[in-house]
Image (cartoon, rainbow, N blue to C red):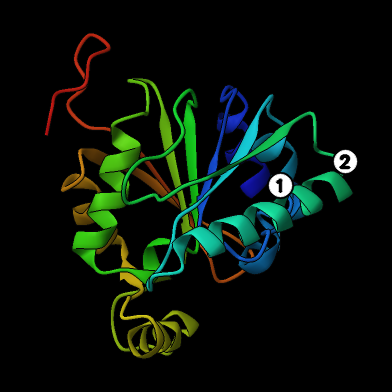
Amino acid sequence: SVWKRSERFARQRKMPDVNRPDGGGKAALRVWQDGVRSRRAIPDIVHRNHVGRVGGHRRGGERDGLRVHAEAGAQTTIAAAGLVERCKFVAGDFFVGVPSGADCYLLKHVLHDWTDDQCQTILRAIRAEIPSNGRLVIVEAVVPPGDAPSFSKIMDLEMLLMAGGRERTEEEFRALLAGSGFMLVRVTSTDGYLSLIEGELAGVDGGVSPPL
């Protein structure tokens, strides 16, 4: 079950959610709601000492205005959820860098917005900060093989037309992670249309990860 599989995240002490700005975003306790539909997965995933949401900018030249808007909305949402002591909002650009000090990095509905090259830029920014024993968790739809109907294939067309991005198969996620210095560990389906794609640093030897 997803509940059983989520137990492996219990050892992660700090877990930022690397996500796009959404006018403040969802509170930490709602990270898993859309598309996952398994409330049983919530306790071991989000009950950490520190939860951060890092917002990068999509396109256009109004980065500073968007950052101010996202921060104001996020602080209001965090306070309303009673998470001020546990959740910190950090404005930034995930193409440039992500917050350090976490042992698990979460991206939900992020990578499907971008091309493979852009995704690898984001993942390499995470790789620069993640410790040798860290965990990468990607929450996205995984396109099944073959020609059978799937909601993820409709999403694939939507992302192509609206954002220039794409949904990906398991093998495409494997290649994407490999090109960014990670290795795909497992893919876990959920009760919704999304899956949990877990990655770890590739080529770690004696606690030191090799440079790309």
Q: Three-letter amino acid code at disc 1?
A: Ala
Q: Position of residue 154 (x, y in %)?
A: 44, 89
Q: Report the residue marked by disc 2.
A: 82
Residue contact between numbered discs 1 and 2, judged by CB atoms under 8 Å: no
Say left or right for 187 vs 170: right
Residue sitting nearer the eye, 122 or 46: 122
Vertical side of 22 occupied by 1: above or below: above
Quarter assignment of residue 79:
top right
Q: Residue at x 64, y 36 (%)?
A: 51
For label 2, the crowd category at 10 Å Cα-Cα, with few meaning under 14, some 14 to 19 and many 20 or more, is few
Q: Is residue 128 something that shows in the picture? A: yes
Q: Three-letter amino acid code at disc 2?
A: Gly
Say left or right for 77 vs 11: right
Q: Position of residue 71 (x, y in %)?
A: 65, 52
Quarter assignment of residue 15:
top right
Q: Position of residue 6 (x, y in %)?
A: 61, 39
- Of labels 1 and 2, the one closer to you: 2
Vertical side of 3 occupied by 63: above or below: below
Q: Secondary structure at mark 2?
A: loop
Residue sitting nearer the eye, 112 or 141: 112
Say left or right for 192 vs 58: right
Name, please, the residue furthest toward the left.
Answer: 212
Q: Residue at x 20, y 44 (%)?
A: 180
Residue 28: assigned label: 1
Residue sitting nearer the eye, 55 or 174: 55
Q: Is residue 200 something that shows in the picture? A: no
Q: Residue at x 25, y 48 (%)?
A: 177
Residue 172: assigned label: none
